[in-house]
Image (spheres, helix red, strand yellow):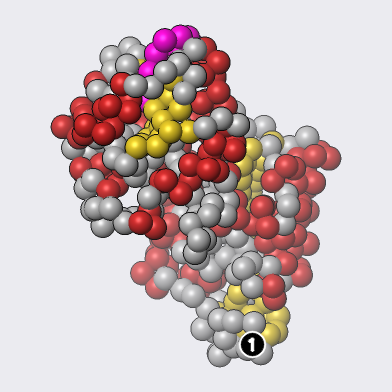
Amino acid sequence: MKTIQDFSFAGKKVLVRVDFNVPLDANYQVTDDTRIVAAVPTIQKILKDGGSVILMSHLGRPKGGYEEKYSLKHVVDCLSNALNLPVKFTKDCIGDMAEQAARELKPGEVLLLENLRFHVEEEKGDTLFSQQLASLGDFYVNDAFGTAHRRHASTAVIAEFFKSNKALGLLMAAEVKNIQKVLNNAERPYTAIIGGAKVSSKINIIKNLADNVDNFIIGGGMVFTFIKAMGGQVGKSLVENEMIENAKEIIALCEKHGAKLYLPKDSVCSTEFSEHGTIATFETNAIPEGYMGLDIGKQAIQEYCEIIASSKTIMWNGPMGVFEMEAFQKGTQQVGIAVANATEENGAFSLVGGGDSVAAVNKFNLSDSISYVSTGGGAMLELMEGITLPGVAAIEA
C-alpha cells in the first residue's frame, strides 16, 4: 500500500483529492469540520516536505453547473483555520483560471479548486476531464475515503495519468488499515453491531462477515424484517417484505458458521413515527397492531451490553433506533457507551462507521473513546462487503 510516507514532496505540486463534503448552515458556515480536520495531517506532511498542495473535492449534489450553496468557497475560512495558514481559492477546477492558479502556486502554499461536480464529467469518470485535472500537478494523492467506492474522474480515472507518482493520503491509509484489521485480523470474541432501517442495505456485509464473527447484534428498523421472517408479529413496524427470504437465508448462514444472531427481546414502540404518539414497550415478536418499534427495549439493552463487554473486537454500523428523537435514543446511547467502555476498560478494538453511527457517537460525546471512527459510510460498507474500492485500486495499479 503506497502512502505519502514513502515519498518526499520537495518542490512538487501535489494534487490531493479530499472529502470536503461538509454540512453548511443557512449562512453557508461549516457546522461540522470533522472531514476537514481529518485531511490536515496529509496536507501538513506535503507542506513540511517543501511541496505545495492543490485540493480537489465535491460538495453536495449540484445538477451540473454552478450553484451558490454548493460552492467550496464556503469552506475556505474553516480550512484556513484548521491549517493555520491562508488558503487560495479558484472559481473553477479546470481551464485557464485553474491552470494559472496552479502555475503560480509556491512551495508551502495551498490552493482549493472549485467544486468538481459543477462539471458533469466528474461523476461520469470522463477521461478528458481527468486529464485536465491531472495537468495541474505532478503528483496525485487520494485522501478521500468517503468517495473511494466511486470510479469518478478525480477519485480513480485521474490516477491513470500518474504512473509511479501517486499514493494514498494518511487518512485513506488509516481507513483501509483499520477496516482490514476487523476484516482479517480480528481478536476474538468478535462482535458486529448492525443497525439501520433496512436489511437490503446490510445483507452483503452480514454475509461477508458470517464466517468471521462470533456475534451479530441487530438493531434499528431492519429488526422487524427478521422478526417477521421468524413468524413474529411486528404491528406496523417497518418491514421489507421482499427481503424476508433473504433474512431467512442470513439466519441459516449464521447457524452454519456458528455466528450467534441476536435480535432485541423487547422494543420501545409508538403509535406514531414521532414522540407524540402513545409509547409502550412490547416483546419484539409480539408488537400489537397500531404500534411500530422505534428503539430496542430494556431487556435488549442489557443483553447487548453484556455481549459487547465480553468482546475483544467490535464493529458498529447503524443505530439501534430513531436516536434523533429523545424518546427513542436510549438503545443507541447505551450501546455506544458499552462500546466505549469495552474499548477503554477491557482493551477491545472498536471500529465505528456509517453516517448515523458516527453522528451517534458524536452526539453522545463518545468518539474519543472509540479506537477508530471511519469517515466513509458507503466506502466502509463496500470494503466490509469484500468489494475492491476503485479509489484504492487506482493507486495500486
Vertical arrangement, residue 252 with respect to residue 97, above or below = below
The residue at the point 45 percent across, 27 percent down is 110
Label 1: few (<14), some (14–19) or many (≥20) C-alpha neighbours in 10 Å: few
Residue 59: x and y, percent? 39, 49
Q: Is residue 259 visible to the viewer in this orientation of the structure?
A: no
Name the outermost residue toward the left: 128
In the image, is residue 225 above or below residue 262? below
| Quadrant in the picture for residue 146 | top left
The front one of 7 and 11 is 11
Residue at 31 percent across and 21 percent down: it is: 103
Q: Which sits in the foreground, 261 or 149? A: 149
Number of numbered discs present? 1
- Image x and y of residue 329, in percent: 68, 68
* Residue 9 among magenta residues: yes
| Quarter of the N terminus within the rendering | top left
SS for tag 1?
loop
Q: Which residue: 36% across, 32% down? A: 391
Residue annotated with mark 1: 276
Image coords of residue 282 (percent x, y): 68, 80
Q: Which amino acid does label 1 sit on?
A: His
Could you tell whether 156 is left or right of 73 in the image? left
Q: Is residue 289 magenta?
A: no
Say which quadrant the C terminus sits in.
Answer: top left
Viewer can see residue 118 = yes
Q: Give the range drawn in magenta.
A: 6-16
Taking the spot 35% from the left edge, 14% from the top edge, the residue there is: 165
For residue 284, what is the image quadrant? bottom right
Q: Is residue 373 left or right of residue 89?
A: right
Apparent side of residue 280 relative to residue 156 in the rendered image (left or right): right
Q: Position of residue 160 (x, y in %)?
A: 25, 23
Q: Nearer the viewer, residue 158 or 361?
A: 158
